[in-house]
């Protein structure tokens, strides 16, 4: 059960369709004076900002890599669309059943 919930969350958060919502929301949160834990509390106040900043950097770097691969004519990163059965995808997936050779 836990794996299916975390897998669903991972697929939703890495879906390129929602990337701009994540980038915009994290920018608004970081620039807003309202925080989950106020910044005047040492260490604890900075943890939420650090987590949101990490999420923002991860999304921006994924977006930049997709753009660079698109310019070179390569296939962009598909982190979740091929793995997510709940979302429509126009990419083709290859099912490989690998066996070990002893």
Image (cartoon, rainbow, N blue to C red):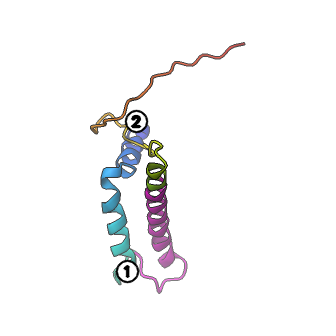
Residue 29 picture quarter: bottom left
Residue highlighted by disc 1:
31
Check disc 2 and report the residue beneath it: 83
What's drawn in magenta, residue-wise? 37-65
Q: Residue at x 57, y 19 (%)?
A: 98
**Residues packed near mark 1 inside 10 Å, few (<14), some (14 to 19) or many (20 plus):** few
- Give whichever of 91, 53 is nearer the camera: 91
Q: Secondary structure at mark 1?
A: helix
Residue at 50% x, 65% y is 54
Secondary structure state at the residue bearing disc 2: loop
Q: Residues within 10 Å of mark 2 (few under 14, many from 20)?
A: few
Residue 65 image point, x, y percent: 49, 54
Q: Nearer the viewer, residue 98 or 68?
A: 68
Q: Measured from the top left, where is residue 23 in percent x and y?
A: 37, 65
Vertical position of residue 27 compared to residue 60: above or below: below
Position of residue 83 relative to residue 49, above or below, is: above
- Looking at the image, residue 20 sits to the left or right of residue 62; the answer is left
Q: Is 29 a magenta residue?
A: no
């Amino acid at each position: 059960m836990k794996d299916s919930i975390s897998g669903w969350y991972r697929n939703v958060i890495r879906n390129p369709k929602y990337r701009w919502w994540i980038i915009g929301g994290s920018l608004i949160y970081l620039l807003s004076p309202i925080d989950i834990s106020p910044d005047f509390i040492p260490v604890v106040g900075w943890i939420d900002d650090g987590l949101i900043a990490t999420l923002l950097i991860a999304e921006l770097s994924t977006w930049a890599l997709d753009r660079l691969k698109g310019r070179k004519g390569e296939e962009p990163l598909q982190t979740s669309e091929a793995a997510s059965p709940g979302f429509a995808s126009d990419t083709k997936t290859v099912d490989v059943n690998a066996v070990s050779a002893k």
